[in-house]
Amino acid sequence: MRRVLIVMAKDPRPGLAKTRLIPAIGATAAAGLYRAFLRDVLDTSALVRAERWVCAYPPESVARVAELAEGRFQVRPQVGPTLSERMVAAFADGFAAGAEAVVMRNSDSPTLPAVVVAEAFDRLERGADVVLGPDLGGGYYLAGLRAPRPELFRGFAMSTSSVLDETLRRARDAGLATATLRRWLDIDTGQDLAALQRQLADGADPERADCPRTEAFLATLPAWRAAPGKSVPAGRSPAAEPGG
């Protein structure tokens, strides 16, 4: 079975990357942390047996994301006005290229191990039509398909706590065989960031992926918090672009 793994990525630019972390650590630190996430995620994803793509948003960031991919991935632009439409388009491109199984993962879960991504492909090869990897906030860090299914993703916001349940409901209504993977941390908010720090501090978690760049950047965060002008008041949260 021909496999395509898609990593959905954003330009690690202040004000665009990890906007919901800005109240906690500031725009520049949020972008720097996301850059570390992305580099670690690409290293982990390169271990998976599949044709590997990175889909970059916004489209003009392809060259910058390609530098981080270091020749190990095809780098393509994300196309569409919302995250859900960009997901639909990326899945369609994977199948149009001849894939028989397409797995899409986020770039916000730097500790997600390669074995979980490989498991998604295995579930598809064993007969699942849809595979979802639930995060801790009601969404998912991964989605896998054996055929294009745009109806699973269109028509609702992807950043809400009901995304997983709604996608599973649509899959059941369509008579599709579904599989879910283990829950994993997706870092969007300051609370998620604290959970990540606890996970990294827990030496008893042998399953998590190595993420040396993320850990190195996290070690600098106390200095970011202490520096004047690096963050915004906790009550002010910038508007997030869909999927931000």
Image: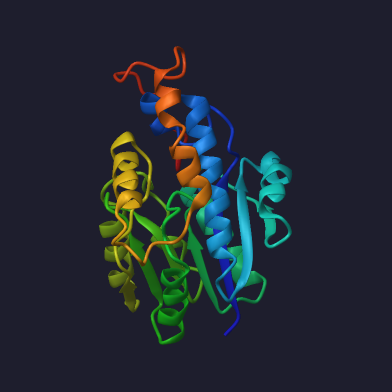
| Residue 81 visible from this viewpoint | no
Residue at 42 percent across and 60 percent down: it is 112
Residue at 32 percent across and 75 percent down: it is 179
The quarter of the picture where residue 209 lies is bottom left
Q: Tell me if 110 is positioned left or right of 236 in this view.
A: right
Residue at 52 percent across and 58 percent down: it is 88
Q: What is the x, y in percent for residue 69?
A: 67, 54
Residue at 72 percent across and 48 percent down: it is 67
Q: What is the x, y in percent for residue 66?
A: 71, 50
Q: Is residue 223 above or below residue 41?
A: above
Q: Residue furthest front?
A: 203
Q: Tell me if 10 is positioned left or right of 153 in this view.
A: right
Q: Tell me if 100 is positioned left or right of 114 in this view.
A: right
Which quarter of the rendering shows the N terminus? bottom right
| Residue 194 visible from this viewpoint | yes
Q: What is the x, y in percent for residue 59?
A: 66, 43
Q: What is the x, y in percent for residue 5?
A: 56, 67
The quarter of the picture where residue 99 lies is bottom right
